[in-house]
Amino acid sequence: MSTFNRGERVRIMGQDCMSEKVYRIKEMKKCKKGGTLYLLKPLEENPVLRLYHEDSKSLLERIC
């Protein structure tokens, strides 16, 4: 799994699909059972925060 920092821009990647939305990482926390929990804020008007759990099946992609 990738290591990200707060403030980085990311996109959600899955096995079959790729999200068009770009998010900024607000908070992150390691889970006891494995994986990482992220609080994501979309880069759009009237953003709604999203809680996202990253594991081996679902990944985030860093946007440069």
Image: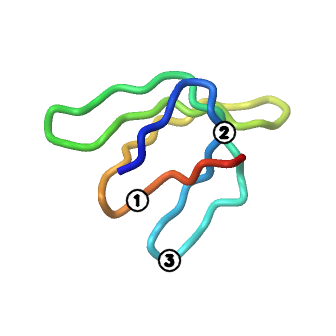
Sequence-first disc among 3 and 1: 3
What is the crowding at mark 2: few (fewer than 14 residues within 10 Å), some, or many (at least 20)?
Answer: many
Give the CA separation, mark 1 to mark 2.
17 Å
- Camera-side residue of 51 and 25: 25
Q: Amino acid at mark 1?
A: Ser
- The image quarter in which residue 37 lies: top left
Viewer-nearest of discs 2 and 3: 2
On residue 10, which mark appears? none
Q: Residue furthest bottom?
A: 16
Q: Residue at x 57, y 30 (%)?
A: 25
Residue density around tag 1, few if under 14, some if 14–19, many if 20 or more, within 10 Å: some
The residue type indicated by label 3 comes to Asp
Q: Which residue is mark 3?
A: 16
- The residue that appears at 64% across and 60% down in the rendered structure is 19
Q: Which residue occupies the foreground of this view, 51 or 2? A: 2
Please give the residue where the numbered disc 2 appears in the rendered image.
9
Residue at 33% from the left image edge and 38% from the top image edge: 36
The location of residue 42, given as percent across then percent down, is 70, 37
Q: Earlier in the sequence, mark 2 or mark 3?
A: 2
**Label 2: which secondary element:** strand
Mark 3 Cα-neighbour bin, 10 Å: few <14, some 14–19, many ≥20: few
Check the image and report above or below for 61 versus 57: above
Q: Residue at x 15, y 32 (%)?
A: 32
Type of colouring: rainbow
Q: Looking at the picture, how far across and down is residue 12, in whole percent?
A: 56, 54
Residue position marked by numbered label 1 in the rendering: 58
